[in-house]
Image (tube, grey):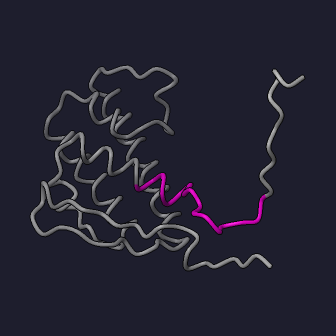
Amino acid sequence: MAVFNAAEIVEPLDFKFEAFVPGCNGTIKEPDDSQIARFWADWRKLTVDARRHAEATGKAFSDADGADGDPGEAITALDDTDTAVELHKRNAEIHSALCSGSPSAEEILGLPMRVRTRFYSWLEQEVMNPEAVAGGGNAQVRTLRSAAAG
């Protein structure tokens, strides 16, 4: 009989920032439902704030850049350096809170922008839609006949 083993269904959320933030490696504590809900609420607010600031300074956003868009893209669209830096800081704080503070916002900000953006994407993917590991279910795998077999 197949067994669902919750301890083995997903991989640990290990991170290694060592290449850019010396001594910064660890495992992110699995976020609870309230952390995930807070993350999405804060992330949406950040995106709305970035959009409003950009529009107030004459930057137009297309409909595709709506409130549900990527805050990183909205931040990048800003010409105001101080505002962009503040929004990057808030984005790091939002992601750090999802990680229960490890890594910290300061450690996340220690990563170069391209690496930081990839960390955000990885974290969101792993938390919101992780790929299950072997033994995570009992789905039957069927071999399909090729079209050439007739």
Q: Locate the N terminus by quadrant.
A: bottom right
Relative side of 10 to 110, left or right: right
What residue is shown at x 47% (from left), y 69% (from top)?
35
Q: Position of residue 43 (x, y in %)?
A: 42, 51
Residue 148 forms part of the magenta stretch: no
Q: Look at the image and give the residue range highlighted in magenta.
A: 123-139
Relative side of 100 to 19, left or right: right
* Farthest residue, direction left: 22
**Is residue 109 placed above or below 104 in the rendered structure?**
above
Q: Position of residue 67 (x, y in %)?
A: 49, 37
Relative side of 146 to 52, left or right: right
Relative side of 55 to 2, left or right: left
What residue is shown at x 46% (from left), y 20% (from top)?
62
**Is residue 34 placed above or below 131 in the rendered structure?**
below
Residue closest to the eye, 107 or 23:
23
Q: What is the magenta segment's predominant secondary structure? A: loop
Q: Position of residue 129 (x, y in %)?
A: 56, 54
Q: Locate the C terminus by quadrant.
A: top right
What residue is shown at x 59% (from left), y 61% (from top)?
132
What residue is shown at x 29% (from left), y 60% (from top)?
93
Asked where in the image residue 83 lies, by quadrant, the reply is: top left
